[in-house]
Image (cartoon, rainbow, N blue to C red):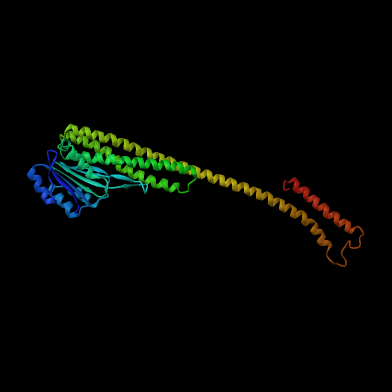
Amino acid sequence: MALIDNAVYVKGRRAANPTTLDETYEVMKAHQGFAWIGMYRPSPDEVRSVAAEFSLHHLSVEDALKGHQRAKLERFDDILFVVLRPARYLDQEERVEFGELHVFVGPDFVATIRHAESPDLAQVRERMEKTPELLALGPEAVLYAILDQIVDEYGPVVAGLENDIDEIEDQLFDGDQAVARRIYDLSREVIEFQRATQPLVGMLESLQKGFTTYNVPAELSHHLRDVLDHTLRVVERGDAFRQLLDNALTVHSTLVTQRQNEETRRLSETSLVQSEEVKKISSWAAILFAPTLVGTIYGMNFTHMPELTWVFGYPFALALMLAMGVGLYGVFKKNGWL
């Protein structure tokens, strides 16, 4: 059963605890109070039952059935339809989990449709029942309490994201190769967090204007202003996180480029050293090749080879070998090869 908690309130106090939706409608009319219906992942038939009883607009019902909506506030005559994106930080997984909450607020009812574990609406109900004077202000007071709870639950998310960003700053300068992927993943979470929180500013401002138009007690408007102040601080933190991550990505790219440049310089230096060694080896090979060439010519066995009977042939060959070697050495030395 998707009906988590269901009650009828009269003058800020719980007057009845209906077990079914049909019973809720009857008791609400009998007591002349307002109903607070809390549902968790209800079936389409249950949503349509609430829609039929309270004459909900078909477009808002369609959004509630489909889910995956952006945070928004819509008014259909005297009924408010609010979509909220609560969030919670999972410490063990070091990630942010986003939920979705649909709230219908009318003159005599509040219906919440929750699609995730967050927010904990049981805490909201318990808090409101402990302050009947606030609950007596009507369904709009319940909406205020839900908004306040969701904004309060953003606090641990902000702290978790801040801690993750601090860890990224350490990883950047430790040369961790996985830091780029973590920056991208965290950036995606921050963007999703901004999508959840930024629309709240306009929604709360619109609610305040509506409270004035529909003669909602001023006390409730003061409470709502406090929620708006907290929301603005959360939004500012989200914007700061986005900027920090953009800067971290820039620093990471700079560090990677610097490391690549250092590696290129090291390879260039190694290549230069190897080139010098090749020059030396080539020079000595050429010096040794010159006498070998002369010796090879004189070693050929031809009958009519010139200089075979010359007395100075052998000393001349040795002198020629030495002269060629010394000459090549001088040339290579002059060119810096040796």
Quadrant location, the N terminus: bottom left
Viewer-side residue, 275 vs 113: 113
Based on the displayed image, in which of its 4 quarters is residue 321 positioned? bottom right
Q: Residue furthest bottom?
A: 303
Q: Position of residue 260 (x, y in %)?
A: 54, 46
Viewer-side residue, 169 vs 286: 169
Residue shown at the point (79%, 59%) measured from the top left: 293
Q: How many marks?
A: 0
Residue shown at the point (83%, 63%) measured from the top left: 299
Viewer-side residue, 10 vs 112: 10
Q: Position of residue 106 (x, y in %)?
A: 15, 42
Q: Position of residue 125 (x, y in %)?
A: 20, 42
Q: Residue furthest left?
A: 30
Q: Position of residue 81 (x, y in %)?
A: 20, 44
Instruction: Let me know if residue 162 appears in the view.
Output: yes
Instruction: Let me know if residue 199 appears in the view.
Output: no
Side (left or right) of 129 relative to 292: left
Side (left or right) of 97 relative to 216: right
Based on the displayed image, in which of its 4 quarters is residue 132 positioned? top left
